Amino acid sequence: MFQAHYLQQFVEAVFKKIGCPPHEAALAAQVLISADLRGVDSHGIARLAGYVRLYDHGRLNPTPNVHIVHETPSTAVVDGDRGLGLVVAPRAMEIAMEKAEKVGSGWVAVRNSNHFGIAGYHAMMALEKDMIGWTMTNAAPLVTPTFSLDKLLGTNPIAVAVPADEQPPFVADFASTAVAYGKFEILQRKELPAPLGWAQDALGQPTTDSNAVRSGGGLLPLGTDREHGSHKGYGLGAIVDIFSGVLSGANFGPWVPPFATAGFMTAQQAVGLGTGHFLGAMRVDGFQPAADFKRSMDTWIGAFRNARAIEGERVLIPGDPEREMEAQRREAGIPLLGPVVAMLRELAERFELEFEE
């Protein structure tokens, strides 16, 4: 087990070594470690070497000039200047919240960015200001739309964070696929098969091969197949791609560049700039007094918590598992797989840092 503060310091040191300013290195590390704390191990420190490889390949600018290229009172397009998405997305959410404070809501489309970690981190930034936060991002094409053999979409997550009063906030953070690709990377490290319904092989047949995507297959949309609603997951992924990529001027569809961990992929000819995100903030008091809304949210959440549950189970609110995991891991520490520890040791050796197991 590793304590969060220790991993935070190590990640921060690595980002400094590739040239990130201290405050941005600290923010990027915080976003990454927040994923591990919340149990989203696929998007946490396991991705650190991937960001370093982006830098090595000239795709990551450690000192970006994140700036607005077009705006109205309630909207903006932000150019991330090839910066860490872990830094670009929080800045974009700050801009969205600044606009929301002035006119009720703010919506920011981002281009020329990179992988931004877990979507929920950026959406939850709005909670501190009694705002509802929205976050989306497109990603490299690993997903086959319903009936397709070609990979045309990314896992394209959506996160929505809604404040409450005495209850913890509602935080929904999910991929538009049956599962995020990072889950496959974890299975690959453990040399385990994947559950049926996560992927199809190169011929479009269901498979449990955790390397199927590397072998010409693809991830399946949320719903898995047409009979179970995969067209709805396909639709969600398409919406995210249009908002994040087409609207912002970023790459979209099959042209979104791969993250560095997807070494089996090659970038297609660009149709835009980098990876795209879409972030929004809405003032609750733009609709009703914030105190009234949050009390109503408590009532809403309470109704679900008090629902009769299947024997041995309980009805959860989106955000409950991650919040409970964070409390547990802050106290007991964060478990890391052997291959992840080995990767951290390699980074420590390369950058002349200490890494204690």
Image: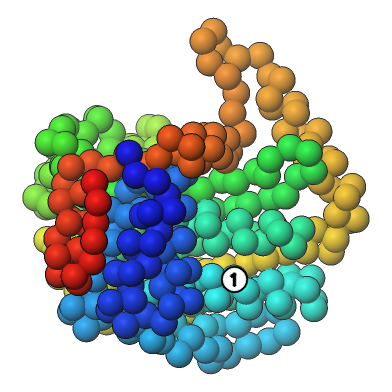
| Left or right of 325 in this view: 55 | left
| Left or right of 180 in this view: 238 | right
**Residue 5 percent across, percent down from the top left:** 43, 53
Q: Residue drawn 72% across and 49% down?
A: 163
Q: Eyeballing the image, is 104 above or below 178?
A: below
Q: Residue drawn 53% across and 37% down?
A: 327
Regarding residue 269, the answer to whether it shows in the image is no
Q: Which residue is mark 1?
A: 93
Q: Eyeballing the image, is 162 above or below 250?
A: above
Snapshot quadrant of residue 112 = bottom left
Name the residue nearer the viewer: 98 or 193.
Answer: 98
Name the residue nearer the viewer: 1 or 237.
Answer: 1
Image quadrant holding the N terminus, namely: top left
Snapshot quadrant of residue 14 = bottom left
Q: Eyeballing the image, is 97 above or below 356?
A: below
| Left or right of 277 in this view: 219 | left
**Residue 54 percent across, percent down from the top left:** 24, 74
